[in-house]
Image (cartoon, rainbow, N blue to C red):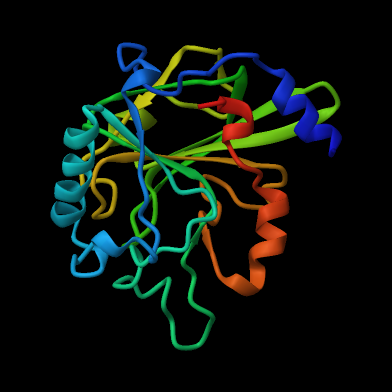
Amino acid sequence: MDAFIKDLISVSDTTIQILDKDLVTEQYVPLDLSKNNAELYNLNITDPMVCQDYIDKVLGYEKGSVAFGGYLEERNLYSDKESFTSSTAPIRNIHLGIDFWCQAHTKVMVPIDGIVHSFKFNNVPGDYGPTIVLQHSLNNHTFYTLYGHLSLSSLDNLKLGKAFYTGEVLGVLGTPDINVNYAPHLHFQIIRDMEGYMGDYPGVCAKNKLEHYKGNCPDPNILLKL
């Protein structure tokens, strides 16, 4: 096993909370937004209201408060977004992080000590909206975590190098008008090499790039243990 993966596993023996601690993990419900989910075949899942209605139905049925999942999930969620479906490049539809779908303004908690690497309002349709990237040191490894679809206020008073500690509030989730037309959620991604990006990094890839991004963006659940 890769030494970095071993170190991620060793961070905690128990689940790490990444949302408001009042939302206990027993309230987290797995969500399937893949193109193979038959329940989505007749839904315009790219519409944030339709997407939210479906998530609410899943949460209601399971009596949960947070719907989560999506690592390496092949989705139709991006099919209306030009930057994902350009005719001059392969379609990008494989998700590289975990999404946590819940109410706007929910607090986002830092899962491991780090400092601000970069932040940005990525306001292109289909992008992250307000985004924060933290840099972490773990034994001999430097790596990064990305938090997308936050509120604009989450970027207030940030500066490069600012320290955040495990369990501290990083920000809150944004509304669809701010998070670039998605139902409210957190996109959480682990990144080994930022490859020159600042305040942004691809969260969705094409099949022909999957092996590269799978290696650079391991499953966040290795750390979180949900």
Pick the quarter of the image with the N terminus.
top right
Q: Is 128 above or below relative to 155? A: below
Q: Is 28 above or below relative to 211? A: above
Residue 24 position by quadrant: top left
Q: Is residue 64 left or right of residue 70?
A: left
Which residue is found at the position 46% from the left and 18% from the top? 17
Q: Is residue 161 left or right of residue 75?
A: right
Residue at the bottom extreme, as displayed: 87
What percent of the width, then of the height, locates residue 118?
55, 38
Q: Is 203 above or below relative to 117? A: below
Front residue (pair 39, 107): 39
Q: How many marks?
A: 0
Residue 25 position by quadrant: top left
Which residue is found at the position 57% from the left and 29% from the top? 160
Which residue is found at the position 39% from the left and 56% from the top? 127
Q: Is 43 above or below relative to 99? A: below
What percent of the width, then of the height, locates residue 46?
25, 63
What percent of the width, then of the height, locates residue 85?
41, 77
What percent of the width, then of the height, locates residue 61?
19, 36
Which residue is found at the position 80% from the left and 33% from the top? 4
Q: Is residue 98 left or right of residue 184?
A: right
